[in-house]
Image (cartoon, helix red, strand yellow):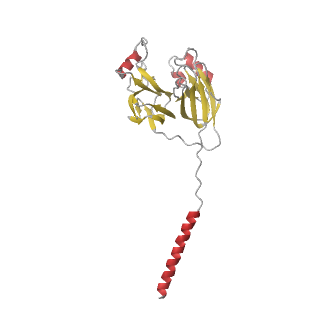
Amino acid sequence: MVFRQRMTAGLRLAAVTVLMLALAACNATPAPTATPVPLPAVAVDVSDTALTMPADVPAGLVQVTVSNSGQAPHSPLFARLNDGVTQEQFMETMQTDQSGTAALALVSLLGGAQAKPGASQQMVFDFKPGNYIAIDMGEGGPTGGPPLMANFTATAGSGPAPAAPVATVNAELIDFQFTLPDQIKSGAQTWKIENKGGQWHEMGIFKLNEGVTVDDVMAMMMSETPPEGPPPFEDVAFWAPMSQGQHAWWTVDLPPGVYTVMCFLPDFSSTPPTSHLEHGMVRTLTVTE
């Protein structure tokens, strides 16, 4: 009898304890969630005669929006000057070095997206503290003058760092190939572009005209005489040259279709320099509904 009473009392105590714990859980204050840190935003405007942007930007992850107010396509290229190198020194080297290798040794190229007339491109760079230039060669511009340039400084701040964008497409540039999906969905997507090769690389996304092959494009490039008429492809999107070890994020919006991805940059390690396309740096990409 005594044993039964003790057991009943124990069960009651256990039930009360469980009930109290349940009530405590219901009344507990939920743990605070961290508020995402927004990416700092920098606006860049490029026209056929000028390239303007802030002279100071925060170091770290920065969202850069390039807007083209000109009449021709523009591809501002962002580059970090090596420590101790000035913009004047870089420009002088560009003008005197016909091969371009000496000028390349003075900077780290971060790339940049081409913006069509009246359009904008959004990308995210990871700016290390230091001095930078944004340079546009004015491709197709009406002035035919010197490159458009702006210099800026990235300065480290003291606040919390924002999180990196979440990529839906990973595009790796390797010697001499593109590593990216064979097929992606149409619409705006975030691409992470990363140069994992030992050389500089660029990424052009083209839609070849019906009946045109990559061999036709290569023959056009290697021809000593300029081609007549419009090119045999549509230049859909373009990522400017990027140095080895660099990465960035790019918002790309491709309509459904079949595209050819190519890198035209020269391989300076070969004599004479041959293009990366000749080395086989080409890839087919299918975009579905």
Who is closer to the viewer here, 248 or 210? 210
Is residue 241 visible in the rendered image? The answer is yes
Image quadrant where one finds the C terminus: top left
Q: Residue at x 51, y 75 (%)?
A: 14
Is residue 181 visible in the rendered image? The answer is no
Q: Position of residue 175 (x, y in %)?
A: 42, 30
Q: How many marks?
A: 0
In the image, taking residue 57 as reference, residue 246 lies left or right, namely left
Q: Is residue 278 above or below residue 25?
A: above
Q: Position of residue 277 (x, y in %)?
A: 40, 24
Residue most extreme to the front? 289
Q: Is residue 96 above or below residue 9?
A: above
Dividing the picture into quadrants, the one containing residue 211 is top left
Dividing the picture into quadrants, the one containing residue 197 is top left
Q: Position of residue 74 (x, y in %)?
A: 54, 23
Dividing the picture into quadrants, the one containing residue 171 is top left
Residue most extreme to the bottom? 1
Who is closer to the viewer here, 227 or 58? 227
Q: Position of residue 181 (x, y in %)?
A: 40, 36
